[in-house]
Image (cartoon, rainbow, N blue to C red):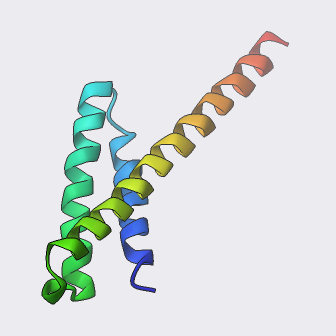
Amino acid sequence: MQELLPILIGMAAGAMSCRIGSTRLRTGAAVVLSLTGGFLSMAVNGEWGLGVTAMLADTALVAGGTIASVVILAVLGRARRRVAGNLLSS
């Protein structure tokens, strides 16, 4: 259950970073939010005593959730635009 929180934080970070129009800013925001989310999830889970490895593991989970969220939202957005384009051309 403790590993679900970093993934959910990553998904939220990905959803927030998808709102940014510029690709460079979106990438930077995703990196910053992943690092912040890894630190936040370590603090919430109470893994302070485990050291840097716990933070790296949580940060990797947050980054994975962020990347997955960005990819899923990009695919869904592209599919939505394709359907809307097909409806307009009919």
Residue 82 image-quadrant placement: top right
Q: Viewed as shown, does residue 43 lie left or right of 87?
A: left
Instruction: Decide: is 54 above or below 25.
Output: below
Please state which of residues 45 and 53 is positioned toward the viewer in this rendering: 53
Q: Viewed as shown, does residue 60 lie left or right of 68?
A: left
Q: Which percent across, then down, holds residue 63? A: 35, 54
Residue displayed at 27% across by 55% down: 34
Q: Quadrant of the C terminus?
A: top right
Residue displayed at 33% across by 43% down: 17
Q: Which percent across, then down, holds residue 50? A: 18, 85
Residue displayed at 42% across by 67% down: 8
Residue displayed at 45% across by 76% down: 4
Q: Which percent across, then down, holds residue 12? A: 39, 58
Instruction: Decide: is 11 above or below 42.
Output: above
Q: Which percent across, then down, holds residue 28? A: 22, 37
Q: Viewed as shown, does residue 76 lie left or right of 5?
A: right
Q: Viewed as shown, does residue 45 lie left or right of 12?
A: left
Residue found farthest to the right = 90
Instruction: Decide: is 80 above or below 31.
Output: above
Residue found farthest to the top = 89
Residue 39 image-quadrant placement: bottom left
